[in-house]
Structures are given as structure tokens and as C-alpha cells.
Amino acid sequence: MRRSLIAVVSLAVSSQVNAAERLVELVIQDAQVPSTVTDFPVLIARANLPNEVLDPSGSNNAQADGGDLQLFSDEAMMTRLPLDVVTFEHDTTTNAGDAVIEIWTLAPTVNGSADTSLWLRYNPAGTESQPATSASYGRDEVWQDYAAVYHANEASGDLTDSTGNGNTAADVNTPGYSETGKIGAGVSSEEASDSHFAAPHAASFDFSAVTGYTVQMWIDLAGSQANWSSPYSKGDSTDDDWSIGRFNNTDDLTVYNNGTPATITGGWAAFAGSGLSKLDVTWNTTDDDAYLYQDGALFGSAAQTEQPVHNTGRSFRIGATRDAGSDPIEVDAILDEIRVIGIPLSADWFATEYNNQNSPSTFIVEGSPADISGGGSAVPAIIQQFLH
């Protein structure tokens, strides 16, 4: 019976694993993770992939479109993780290192006290495709907790919402595209041309009953700005659902809930003229405070006791404030990787995100690729599942 089981399992494995398939370990460094975070979106960039994966003329490269990429949380490939393959291409020449790569996965746990390993499988001989966005292991699963996620890498037109919620942000008055973002390309808004992006109201933007929310982006904020200009807003100029803005021609940044301001001293000046910086704004009902983070570190906070409201006639605007009936006030800025979530994320979450996105090569260290078949450790592990 035991021999029969081994034969059956060996046959099953051989039918699923092509002799050409490869596996490489990607190790998240615990020193980059202040404390353990769960259900965490991890960025995988060019610096995290072995040269062979992206070699345009190599025999062990991945498909040129990344359709064969699969990621697992274990070497035995028993637990597959979802992928959002935003951009994938080969290097222009062998070992050139110039491929533009932006891949996101949802890691169940990223450990703060020990390294966390992920395992990337690719198939040089394959002709595979990534799952449909709404399918198992597809894009939507990566962002299942979010209200909206905009990678902002479009060359024209609307911004795609990667969550599956359908919160497409329409272009208003032709914003800027293909700007120099932090993670690939970004977009820009401008006051002079009234250009920004706007997504219609949606249930996923309703924070009237949540215990907190968070809005995030990378932003390159010009030094000179109009009064009340805003990187994002849900609402209008006098009665915002939730938004931020430059407060009354000062250096301060105000977080609005239901039109009630919470002003963080010096918050606007910290970003103005500082180049690309990571901006995180979060609010929670536990202490009724609004918090501003810059590059993963707390900048300041202010008391905010007001719960956001949800007015169905108000858009979520990226790069502008105000809504119907008012002239929008845009912010002059480059914007990248804009996210909205109805959860108050933590200080350690922001620090881990910054470390991952600011220096992917420090956050994840690649291992040495190897064939999956031919006695690799993945096969015995799978067999053991049947023998015990």
C-alpha cells in the first residue's frame, strides 16, 4: 500500500511539475520589519529577482509577460499567494538590470523577529497566463481589504482601481501622465489647468460607521500651493466627508472629518518642496486622533472627534478638493500608489511599507534559483502530505 501511494503521488507531481520549472526563495529581512504584520501587501521589484528570470535570451527566463509567475509561502508550494502583476518585462540585454517590474502579493504574515521566505516559481518552457483579476490568486485578492488602490502607471485616461471595487478615477482636464513616480510611473495634478482625477461616490468609500480609516500615497508636492489645495478629498469645500488640505495659507495640514478640522502644525511645509515622500494619514475612534506620517515615521497628530459622514453626491478626488457646484482647487504635485482603506493602520505597518517601497533590494534578498523537479525539496514535502 505504501509503495502504491508513493507511485500515485509521484505520478501526480510529475504531471504538474514541468522539468524546466524553476524556484527561487525571496527572503524578507526581519530587520526591515519593526513588528509582525499580517495580510500585508508586499512589493517585488526588479532588484528582488535573479538575472536569469529577466534574461531576454536565457534558457531559464520567465515568460516575457510574467504569465507563468506563481508565488508561495512555503518551499513545498502548498500555499499559493495572489499576485498583482502591474508591470513585467525582460531586461533589454542579459544582466542589464533595466526591466521595469512592479508585482504585489498579499503575504499572510511578515515576521518582525525572524526572516520571512516567499517562493517564486516560473516556467521557462511555459505558455501560461495570470489568473483573471477576480479569480483565485488574482489581482483582486491582493487588495481585498481596500476601498481603492491606484498604481497610477497609466499613460493616459482613467486610473484603474486594483481592488475589484470598480472605483475607477476619471481624468479631469487631462492630468499629467508618465511622471517620475516612486514605484514606476506616476501621475500629476495641476491648479492652473484644473487637472486631477475623480471617482464617483461608492459604498466602499463610506466611513460613517468604521473605527478608523487610512489614506496613503507617494507625493512630490511643489513648494508653492494655492490655499486649501488638497492631495485628496471626499466631499466639498465646506462639509467634507473626509479629506486633507493646506490650512488657511499656513504651513499646517488639516485633516477634515464631516467638515470638522484637525490641524497638524507644520504638516504641509514638511512635504512641500521635499521631493517624493510617502504620505500616510490615519484616524481612529480609539483615541479620536488624526495622525500624519512622513516616510514611515510619525510627523504629528491632532484631536479629531468627528466621525466621517458619507454623502452619496460627493466624489473621491485625487489631487483636488471641493465637489459639485464649486471650482476644484488642485494641488501641484506628482502622485503615485494611492490607497484608501477603512481601517486605521499602525505605525509599524507604515514603517514596514516605507522600507519595502523605498528600498526593495534591502527589504527582500533573493536566493539562488534551482530546478523544481529532479529531486528538489518540493517533491518530498508533497509526498509526505500523503504518507502521514
Image: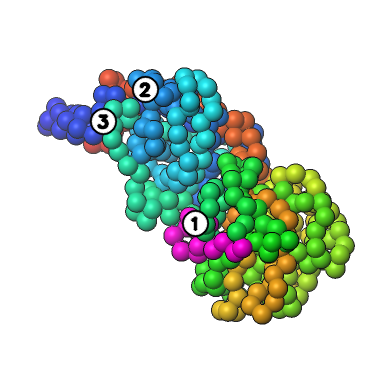
Which is nearer the eye, 314 or 381? 314
Place residue 343 in its image quadrant: bottom right
Q: How crowded is mark 1: few (under 14 residues within 10 Å), some or many (20 or more)?
A: some
| Neighbours of disc 2 within 10 Å: few (<14), some (14-19), many (20+) | many
Q: Do the residues labelled 1 and 3 touch (CB within 8 Å)?
A: no
Q: Which mark is residue 160?
A: 1
Residue at 64% in and 35% down: 359
In this view, 136 is above or below 24: below
Q: Where is residue 29 in the image (x, y as percent from the top left)?
A: 59, 32
Amino acid marked by disc 3: Val
Q: Nearer the viewer, mark 1 or mark 2?
A: 1
Magenta segment, which residues? 159-173
**Which percent across, then down, holds residue 89?**
45, 34
Label ID, residue 60: 2
Residue type highlighted by circle 1: Thr
Residue at which label 3 appears: 17
Is 163 in the magenta? yes
